[in-house]
Structure formats: structure tokens, C-alpha cells
Image: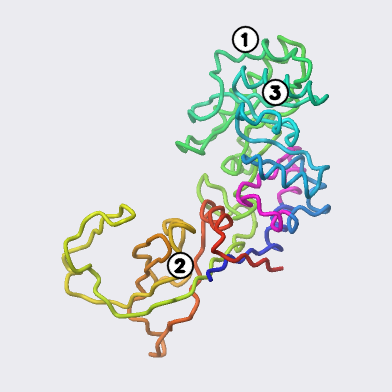
Amino acid sequence: MAELEINITEIRNNVKKLSTYFKKHDIKWSLITKVFSGDKEFMRQILTPDIIKDIHSVGDSRLSSLINLKEINDELITIYIKPPPLQYIDDVVKYADISLNSSFKTIIALNKAAKKQNKIHKIIVMIELGELREGINREDLSDFYESIFQLENIDVVGLGSNLGCMYGIEPTYDKLLQLCLYKELIEAKYKSKLSLISGGSSITLPLIENQTIPKDINHFRIGEAVFFGTSPLNNNQFLDLSTDTFNFYTQIIELEEKGIVPDGIISDASIGHVADYEQKDFGRTTNKAILDFGLLDVDQDGLEANDKDIKLVGTTSDMTVVDIGENINIDGKQKYFIGDKICLNPNYISVARLLNSKFVDKKFIK
């Protein structure tokens, strides 16, 4: 069975380094656990007392994950990091201490649920800054805030924005300055303090390092940098964070010399892929290995082989084919055999999918 290897020590070290870094810059931060996919053992291994003491909160976009977080440690401050669905409002209030919001109707429902549970539910109002995902339009913010800030069981603790997730809109100084200006407007007009200005994610980290982030941005929501050591702004390593955190090992279940080009009329495959080959490939052969995972586990596009001689060729629901070229070591001997394992590096989305797959073993190493 294929196996995802998780380097707990490196991930924990990344958390500690980021906590130190944010403290130095007087910034609070939330550890975003989407990549956990709700895996309780993963949560237990990472969220130990020495780790969580220096983070503001733990956030996730799945309610089931927040439930698991509270089961592991009910003292954790939890954040639901997308607009809550009305169907699960009662549970959002029960398991999330804070939620990100952009809908008046939803906030009214949260207020009602919080009153029923005798709670004060905290919210961060999300503002649209160009990414065209969640967030109210900027020109509507003042009226929106006026409608909600006096709700008895709602505490508006901050403003936030999301950039870089859907269209890749870069978080720039000018973009984030707009968020800060709206903070000043709201505080001046309504005489109320907004303690969290949440304009940061892993993609925003280089702005801190370049000293190009407005001073009022004081809250970051961080996932990718913790678990992969990189910022998606440039996909480069951030600081000295570890990038050696996940390895996906998959076994060779067939190894044969086969044609590069399929034999027959090429059409849409059962999974919708269309074969595309160069004229020079016709009639040639190469060594191909079949690996024991498929699209039900993870998309091959999110994987990169450690061995640069390996090229991912195609995938089906439960098997993936790779081209291993001549299959010869530098000493002239055969490199791979049936039963050997090949190491693939998964990206952020791939790790989340692999953790969701019941057909992939998980191994935690320290």
C-alpha cells in the first residue's frame, strides 16, 4: 500500500520558528490546519502544549475538523475560516470561537444561535480587495458594520481580506493599506476597537521580510508556510523553514518495456484525458512502471518525483504509470525492480487529498 510519510519534528520546528518571527514583529497568528483533513493523530502530534502556547488560534474550513480540534483540546481558540453555511450555524457557534463573515443574513443567524447557547460569538468581517472570493464590497462596509456591531451576542473583533487563493491577486502594500484605512474609518465613526486586522496568509509573508506591510496588519492565517516551508507568492523557501516535511512512497506493481505511444485510435480516456505525443515518439519504447495509487487517492499533477529520470505519464482511478527511461544506474546495473518504492514529493493540495484517502497509509516520523 502507498504511504504518506509525515515529518512531525520538522513541522513542529516550523511552527516554533514562525511563532518567534511573528512575536518579533508584534503579529498574532492562526495555524490553519486544512492540510490535516481532520486527521486526529496528526492534530495530536502537532498541537502539543509547547506548540499552541505561542499561537493565537487554530483555524479550519471544515466543521468536522473544528469538532476534532475541540475534542483534542477544548481550550483551543478555533476559527472557522470561510463564511458559515446557514444549515450548520448552531454547530459553528458551538465549535468555532471566531468565524470569518461577509453576509448579514448569516451574522443574524449566528447572533440568534449564540443567544440560544448563551455565548458571545466573535466575527471578523471579510472585505473584497480584488480576489473576487469572500468579502463584502468596500463601499458597503460602513452600512454593513452599522447593521451588525450592536448585535447583543456578536462581537466584531476585526476586519480581514483574502488574496492570492483563487486568481492569485498579489497582496501588495497598497491593497493591504486599504484594509487598514477601513479599520481607521470604522473605529473613528463608531468608537469601537477592532483588535484583529487579518490581512495575511503564507503568500503575504515576504511583505514582512521586505518591510512593505502596513503597520496595522496584525493577524496572519498561516498553513502552507508551516507545512511546506514556502510562500506561494514565489514558491520559495521562507526564512530557514524546513521544506522536507512530506514524502509519498508508492510501490512498483508492474515494470515492463512498452511503447511510448498507445496502439490504436486515441480518444478520450475513461477519466477524460486525451493522449498527446510527438511524431518522434511513434515506434519507440521505454521502461514503464505502474504504481499503486490513482486519482481516487491524489492527482498526479500535484506530485514530483525525487528521481529526475522519472516522468509521470498517466493515471487512472487506482493506478499511475511512470516512465523510468533506461532504468539503469550510473554503474550500469538495473535501477528499479517490481516491489521497489518510489518517492514522490506532494504539494499542499496533494497532501490534503492523501490524508483523506483510506487507501494510503500514514506514517509519522520524528
> Residue 118, percent across and down?
83, 24
Which quadrant holds residue 287?
bottom left
Tell me the crowding category of disc 2: few under 14, some 14 to 19, or many 20 or more residues within 10 angstroms, Cα based: some
What residue is shown at x 51% (from left), y 39% (from top)?
Answer: 165
Residue sitting nearer the eye, 219 or 282: 282
**What amino acid type is highlighted by mark number 2?**
Ala
Tell me the distance, in whole angstroms, between the alpha carbons under discs 1 and 3: 19 Å
Tell me the crowding category of disc 1: few under 14, some 14 to 19, or many 20 or more residues within 10 angstroms, Cα based: few
The tag on residue 110 is 3
Which portion, as a residue range, is magenta?
A: 18-43
Tell me the distance, in whole angstroms, between the alpha carbons under discs 1 and 2: 52 Å
Q: Given this view, does label 2 or label 3 mark the residue nearer the observer? A: 3
Left or right, 303 with respect to 94, comes to left
Residue sitting nearer the eye, 289 or 311: 289
**What amino acid type is highlighted by mark number 1?**
Asp
User: Between disc 2 and disc 3, whose residue precedes?
Assistant: 3
The tag on residue 305 is 2
**At numbered mark 2, what does the secondary structure look like: helix, strand or loop?**
strand
> Residue 135, percent across and down?
56, 25
Residue identifier under label 1: 143
User: Between disc 1 and disc 2, whose residue precedes?
Assistant: 1
Which quadrant holds residue 89?
top right
User: Between disc 1 and disc 3, whose residue precedes?
Assistant: 3
**What amino acid type is highlighted by mark number 3?**
Leu
Left or right, 61 with respect to 55, comes to left
Tell me the distance, in whole angstroms, between the alpha carbons under discs 2 and 3: 46 Å
* Label 1–label 3 contact, CB within 8 A: no
What residue is shown at x 67% (from left), y 11% (from top)?
Answer: 147
Residue 28 in the magenta stretch? The answer is: yes
Determine whether 264 is above or below 327 in the image.
above
Determine whether 36 is above or below 119 in the image.
below
Determine whether 33 is above or below 323 in the image.
above
